[in-house]
Amino acid sequence: MLRFPRMSQPQLAIPDLDALSLQLEDAPPQEILRWTVATYAPDAVLTCSFQHEGVALGHMLQAIAPRTPIVFINTGYHFPETLAYRDLLLSTYGWNLVEVGPELSQADVEARHGAELYRRDPDLCCEINKVAPLRRAIAGVRAWINGRRRDQASTRRGLPILETLPSGLVKVNPLARWSSKDTYYYLKQHGLPFHPLFERGYTSIGCAPCTRPVLAGEDERAGRWAGRDKVECGIHGALDAEPTAD
Ligand code: SF4
């Protein structure tokens, strides 16, 4: 097992975290998770939208620190299959799920911004339904574990294992080095179920109005906001900036 410094201090200095991130480059995800919970628990959470990366990390955490909160942002627009998959995993593994959602109902959002906001202004729709709920959910959290991988998109190619945001929040990316095959084989090897839409060509799954199956030869995330410039929901970019009032 690798040995890394643990902290009794609230936060490592950023240069130390950068060096530690490099040290963790070759560590398996479980080792990165062990260091994270040893360092930051109980102020560490995993976010999971019930894509396979989040499911793999949830499964690893179950063996390492089962009370670690797993935050699911329920936008109200998820596929019924995603909610069924969530229910299956919860009933099987008993994760410590924390479900959060928008403050406004869909009817209130519609009254304020008009129908089908996701078509007209998906950035605002994501801000209301994803980013703002996440900001509330991770207020006071010191480490945010998430399932991004470098090979998912050009915008993720430089993803380090550890990142420090201006707010001091540390983002932990244990699967940064993994490929989609690594995730697939992890689920297979551990007998975990696959998302019901995966075999129907959905290689990246978000809200139903903004996700379609990918076509042959397309990138893994090509089915997200297809036909638009948008490639990210904003929960990562928005929170990388200085905190703002909702
Ligand atoms: S992914 Fe689409 S439906 Fe979901 S919050 Fe963003 S714009 Fe709205």
Image: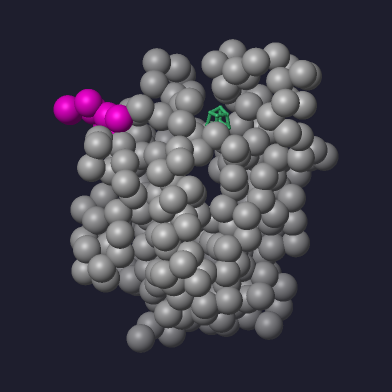
State the residue at coordinates (71%, 20%). 110
Q: Main secondary structure of the magenta part?
A: loop
Give ligand 1's quarter of the image: top right
Q: Which residues are magenta?
A: 213-220
Q: How is the image coloured?
A: one colour
Say whether residue 32 is visible.
Answer: no
Of 55 and 135, which appears nearest the observer? Answer: 55
> Residue 184 at what x, y percent from top left?
24, 56
Residue 199 is inside the magenta segment: no
Residue 82 in picture, x, y percent from top left = 44, 46
Q: Position of residue 217 (x, y in %)?
A: 17, 28
At x 59% / y 37%, what residue is drawn? Answer: 76
- Snapshot quadrant of residue 44: bottom right
Residue located 25% across and 37% down the image = 200
Residue 115 lies left or right of residue 208; in this view the side is right
Of residues 4 and 225, the one nearer the viewer is 225
Instruction: Specify the farthest residue to the right.
Output: 245
Q: Answer whether residue 193 is visible to the viewer in this image.
A: yes
Magenta-colored stretch includes residue 214: yes
Question: Where residue 113 sits in the image (x, y, percent)?
Answer: 73, 17
Quarter holding the C terminus is top right
The residue under the point 56% across, 81% down is 38
Q: Quadrant of the N terminus?
A: bottom left
